Amino acid sequence: MALNSDAYRLAAQEDRCAPRTRLTIPATLRASGGRAFQSVVHDLSISGFSAASINRMHEGQLCWLTLPGLESLQAEVVWWDNCIVGCAFTELLSPIVHDNILQRYSNVGVYRNVI
C-alpha cells in the first residue's frame, strides 16, 4: 500500500501512537533509483524510523531499509534534516519483529500484555 494520501502521511508523521525507541542499529538504506549505503538507525517504532543519510532524500521518496537478519523494508521519506531522514514504513512492522529488534539492540526489555 503506497502512502499517497496527505492525511495518511500526516498521520504517520504526527500521530505517534506507536512508541519510538532510541537505539543504534547498523543498517543499509537505499533510496528509489539510488545505490544502497551504510546507515545507522537512531529510533524505531512499528510505523517508522529515523536514520543517518549521507544522501539528500526528499519527502515522498520511496526507500528501503535493511536491518541485519531481515529482508528490506519499504518506507516513504517523511522528512530529511541535516543528514538525518525520518521515514514511515509502507506496512507496519510486525510487533513480534519490532520486539525482537529492540531486545537485540537495546538494553531495555520489551514486554507485551497478552489478552
Image: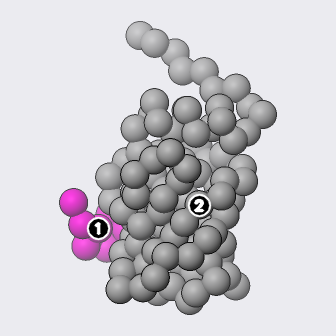
The residue at 48%/59% (across/down) is: 66
What numbered label is drawn on residue 47? none
Q: Which span of residues is magenta-colored? A: 1-11
Q: Give the residue type at disc 1.
A: Leu
- Residue positioned most to the right: 107
Q: Closer to the camera, 74 or 79?
A: 74
Question: Disc 1 designates what residue?
Answer: 3
Q: Is residue 51 above or below residue 70?
A: below
What is the count of numbered marks?
2
Q: Residues within 10 Å of mark 2 (few under 14, many from 20)?
A: some
Q: Give the residue type at disc 2.
A: Ala
Q: Is residue 51 above or below residue 22?
A: below
Task: Determine the secondary structure under disc 1.
Answer: loop
Q: Position of residue 93 (x, y in %)?
A: 41, 45
The residue at 55%/32% (across/down) is: 99
What numbered label is drawn on residue 27? 2
Q: Closer to the camera, 29 or 18?
A: 29
Where is the C terminus found, in terms of image quarters?
Answer: top left
- The answer to whether mark 2 and mark 1 are in CB contact below 8 A is no
Q: Is residue 38 above or below residue 57?
A: above
Tell me the CA gap for discs 2 and 1.
23 Å
Q: Nearer the viewer, mark 2 or mark 1?
A: 2
> Is residue 60 in view?
no
The residue at 54%/66% (across/down) is: 28
> Is residue 92 in view?
yes
The residue at 40%/51% (across/down) is: 71
Res 63 → quadrant: bottom left
Where is the N terminus found, in terms of image quarters?
Answer: bottom left
Horizontally, is 95 left or right of 83 in the view? left
Q: Position of residue 112 (x, y in %)?
A: 54, 21
